[in-house]
Structure formats: C-alpha cells, structure tokens
Image (cartoon, coloured by chain):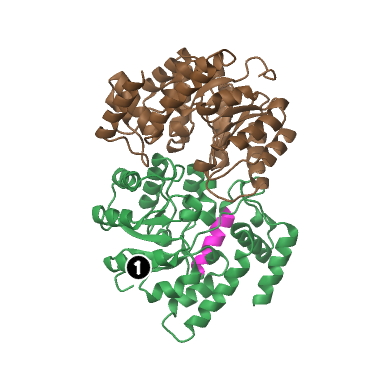
Chain colours: A green, B brown
C-alpha cells in the first residue's frame, strides 16, 4: 500500500447486493439503506458487481440506482461501480456516467458473450471504452472472474493495458480463485502502482502481506465489520485468528448459492422478507435452507 | 415437417451478420441490402444471433436495425430476431418489439452471465418474458448454444416449458455441436410440433431425415443458395452430394474465426472493405488471412 496515492480506492469493498421488490423491480430505498450501512462499517461500495446481479439489470436501472445513492448524499469517491458490458456502447455509457458522478473508480468486466477471444480483441474493447470516455479522471479496475465470465484477463493483456494507459488502468479484482495468479499480479504489477484486490476475504491477509490493496468480496455485504477490522489491523498480533474467523463465516455462506444466501440473511436480520428476492436465473433459498442458514449463522456468534 | 403449421418458420435461416461503419456504428443500409439478398436466395432472417454480434449491440441499436428492415418493406414473418438477454427487462422489451412487428418468431438465449444455474431459475426467466409480453402471437425458439453462452438448455427444461406454454414455446436452435442432443430433441419434441433447427448445415440432411424443421446456420450468410437448395430437394437423388459440397464450403470458413471470415468474404464480393469491420472483442482477419480465404473460396467454385 506504500504505492497508493491519497484518496485512491483501497481496503474492503462490498459488491453491493441489489434489493428487489416482489415484482422484481429494483428497490432504491433498500439499496440506499444497505449502502449507507456498509459505509458505516468501513466498506467501500463496489455496486453493480457479480453479487449485485448487475448483469441482470438494464443500463437504465443501473444509472437510476447510482443516481439514487448520489441523491441520498452518499460519497461517490467511495463507489466503484461495475460498468463492463457485452455491448461496448453500454460500457461507454455506464463508465462515463460513473466518472461524471465522481466515482473513485470503475470495475470493468470484459465483453463476456464470446469465449476464446484474443488478447488483441480484449485490448481493443478496453481501449475503445477509454478513448470514448476520454476523461482523465477515469480509473479502471479490471475484473478478472473467469469462472463466471468465461473470459479471462491475462497477465500479458494487463501488461499491455498498463503500458498504453498508465494511470487510467489502475488495478484489478482477481476472482479467479487461483492464488498463483493473484501472486503473479502482486509481484509484477502492484509495485508499479496497479492495485491488486483479492476477490475473496479468505486471502485478504495473504494479499496485504504481499503488498496488495485489499479485497472486494461478496461477504462484505453481510460481514463487513470484521473484514474491515482485519484490513485495519493486519500487522497486529491476532491477524491470523481474525482471518480464520472470517473464513468460518464465509464457509457458511459458501455452502449455499452465495447471492440468495446473503439476501436471505439480510431479510432475516431486517425482518424484511422481500430482501430475499432475486432475479431469474437465480433462485431464492427455500424455507428449509433459509432456516438452516439462520441457525448456522447464530451458532457462529 | 408434417407437423408444421402453415406460415410457421421452417427451412434455412441466416443468423444475419451485422455490418458496421468504420466508427463501429451499425450500418443500416448495408444490413437492409444483405437481408434483401438473403431473402432472395430463399433464406429466412435470424437477425441478432451469435453471428450477428447481437450481444455486442445495445437494445436501442437492435430496435433500430429491426425497424430499418421493416421500413424497407422486408417481411416480418420471415424474421426470427434474437431477443434473449442477461437482463430480463431487456429481453422483454426486445421480444415485445419483435412480436408487435409481426416477426415469425424470436430466438431466445437464456440469461448467460451466471453459470451453473438451475433449470428452475432458467424456467423462471423464460416464463417471466412470456408472462410480461403476454401476447398470443409470441413464438419462442429456444437457443441452445452452450459452447458460447455457457448456459445449456436441458431436455428436462424444454419438457417443462412445452408443458406450461404449449404453442408459445415453438422450437429450438441446437448449436451444441452434439448430434446425440439434436437427435434426442428430434425424437422427443419434434413430433409434438416443437420445431428443431440444427445449428449448422453440416447436419441439415440428417435433421430433415429425422423430421426436423431446417437449420439456422452461420454460413447461411455466404452460401445461402446452395443450403436452401438442399433443403428444397433433400428427398431427391444427389442430396448426399449436395450435403458434401456444403460441408466443403463450411470447412473453409471454419478454418478461420467464422464471423470475421464471413465478413471478409462479403467485403471482397461487394468490393466494400468496410463490410469487414467487427466490434471488439472480435478482430477482423489480417490481410494474409483474407487473401488466403479469397483464394480458397475461388478454388471451391
């Protein structure tokens, strides 16, 4: 973190769950409330990520939800919206909107419909967005999540993007689940001011010890406080114990489909059953699963 | 085909390539011209498919291109636009637009960002679109293309959709590349009036002999006439020879990235280099590849 510029995104970000109403429309009031709570726990807002069901939202819905946060007075500098899309004009529109709103950065998926595409094609896709947005304030965090997107962002591609767009290409979220890949990014790119965020808090301590910037992690929605605490105190005694405790909580959520499980947990905590609603193709937990999850979470604390 | 209702989509459909200008904006005039030529060769128009770079287009761009065809007087009944999307409201908007335009059917991808989703979740996704569009004229052709989408449409899911939405769920395009799967669909569903289209003309004759409806195939963009000829004359002597000739032409295109290769071939035929433009993440053929392709195609004829 010695390389981080002041005000630059770092620490723990939550890929913010998107609450829906029973009719599947987004619930802006719940979204604002959840974001405010996460900020209060010290987490940043990686809105419109995988855990946000962002690709299940239209461009207009995403614009509307970001605007709702701004109108509620939440700080844009603490937001890192996902703005990648299969259609480049959509990515340009969302990225421009985020930059003009003053967001601290954007988290950018590659176009993810075609598989087996070349680094040249992916380079052109990112370059097109950068050139169309044409704003020096733009900070792009590349979103590497091949198990879901099916489109990896190679080390060679990062190298080329860093060379062509220094400053603009600012970091990565590595959700590959492959520590060797995260370690390579930390070794090759972090020292050049390219901030590496782990995609799960289970490797937060390892990431910080290797000089990384933090993590952007699903469970940041439901366990933000303790994850932020590890980030703040990772050099102190007891850090490994903190890491182990985080891993236990995560393991509970990970034994269910993560997004429905986190929404079920919030629905229970808030006594607001509609919080459990997901958009197809996701499916909410059934009653047995939800009751079991509640028991297991209670047993942790 | 004995089960086909009159006017129902059948035969050979081209997943129509989408031409772009040099600035990557869609070229409606070239699109209309290409569609008119395909219709003249007897092919139907599966606009906004995988080969159309449809997921690289915004919803507004797709609406605009369909409207351009209608304004040019092309018959909506011969169109089967792709209307699936990751975000259900986008799928609803595109599907409604197609139905209201009088399109013969729509070809529908499942939401394709999340992988490993359940049949229940996919069922809800299709059901949501059907219920929101709420129009008896809707005819959905399911688009099974797991090598690209990463989200298969199982036989069990088709069974359930057919049971719940008879008439509306009208058929499938099988681009799995797995003949055993196509054969199972032909056996289990075609006799119930669910029309099976092969995803490649290399199995057109096999599909027709097993009672299928036709094919929706990439090379329908560049070799429509001979493919349509096999469809029309598949019961005659020489059908196997026709099939072999089709396979030879396809093999040439398939030895390159298909979409750029087909666009290069059309650019050459029309003397219009801009026809070769693709949107990232795709990359056009380089000059060596394009020249070699032209030679190989010339050698075929």
Q: Residue at x 44, y 80 (%)?
A: A233
Residue A164, compared with residue B252, is above or below; it is below
Residue B256, compared with residue A32, is above or below; it is above
In magenta segment, residue A37: yes
Kindly tell me whether residue B134 is visible in this rendering.
Answer: no
> Quadrant of residue A5 in the image?
bottom left
In magenta segment, residue A7: no
Q: Nearer the viewer, residue B72 or A9?
A: B72
Q: Give x and y (percent) for residue A29.
A: 58, 54
Residue A225, compared with residue A87, is above or below; it is below
Q: Nearer the viewer, residue A50 or B147?
A: B147
By secondary structure, the bulk of the magenta-drawn segment is best described as helix
Q: Give x and y (percent) for residue A58.
A: 51, 43
B9 left or right of A135 in image: right
Q: Residues within 10 Å of mark 1 (few under 14, many from 20)?
A: many
Q: Give x and y (percent) for residue A39.
A: 49, 66
Q: Quadrant of the N terminus of chain A?
A: bottom left
Q: How many marks?
A: 1
What secondary structure is found at the residue carrying circle 1? helix
Kindly tell me whether residue B33 is visible in this rendering.
Answer: yes
Q: Residue furthest bottom?
A: A237
**Which residue was labeled with disc 1?**
A186
Q: Residue at x 47, y 71 (%)?
A: A203
Q: Quadrant of the C terminus of chain A?
A: bottom right
Q: Give x and y (percent) for residue B127.
A: 67, 38
B71 left or right of A189 in image: right
Q: Residue at x 37, y 39 (%)?
A: B282
B254 left or right of B235 in image: left
Q: Which residues are magenta?
A: A29-40
Judging from the image, mark 1 belongs to the subunit labelled A
């Amino acid at each position: 973190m010695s390389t981080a510029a002041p005000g630059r995104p770092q620490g723990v970000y939550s890929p913010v769950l998107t609450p829906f109403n029973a009719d599947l429309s987004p619930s802006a009031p719940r979204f604002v409330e959840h974001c405010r709570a996460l900020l209060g726990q010290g987490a940043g807002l990686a809105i419109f990520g995988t855990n946000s069901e962002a690709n299940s939202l239209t461009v207009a819905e995403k614009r509307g939800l970001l605007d709702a946060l701004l109108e509620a007075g939440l700080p844009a500098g603490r937001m890192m919206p996902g703005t990648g899309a299969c259609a480049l004009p959509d990515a340009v529109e969302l990225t421009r909107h985020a930059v003009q709103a003053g967001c601290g950065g954007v988290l950018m998926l590659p176009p993810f419909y075609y598989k087996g595409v070349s680094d040249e094609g992916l380079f052109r896709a990112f370059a097109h967005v950068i050139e169309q947005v044409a704003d020096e304030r733009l900070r792009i965090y590349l979103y590497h999540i091949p198990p879901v997107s099916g489109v990896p962002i190679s080390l060679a591609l990062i190298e080329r993007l860093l060379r062509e767009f220094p400053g603009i290409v600012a970091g990565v979220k590595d959700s590959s689940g492959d520590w060797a890949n995260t370690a390579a990014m930390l070794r090759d790119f972090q020292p050049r001011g390219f901030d590496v965020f782990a995609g799960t808090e289970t490797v937060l301590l390892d990431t910080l010890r290797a000089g990384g910037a933090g993590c952007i992690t699903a469970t940041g929605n439901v366990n933000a406080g303790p994850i932020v605490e590890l980030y703040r105190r990772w050099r102190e005694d007891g850090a490994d114990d903190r890491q182990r405790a985080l891993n236990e909580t995560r393991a509970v959520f990970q034994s269910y489909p993560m997004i429905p499980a986190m929404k079920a947990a919030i629905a229970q905590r808030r006594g607001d059953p509609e919080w459990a609603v997901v958009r197809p193709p996701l499916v909410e937990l059934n009653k047995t699963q939800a009751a079991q999850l509640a028991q297991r979470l209670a047993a942790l604390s």
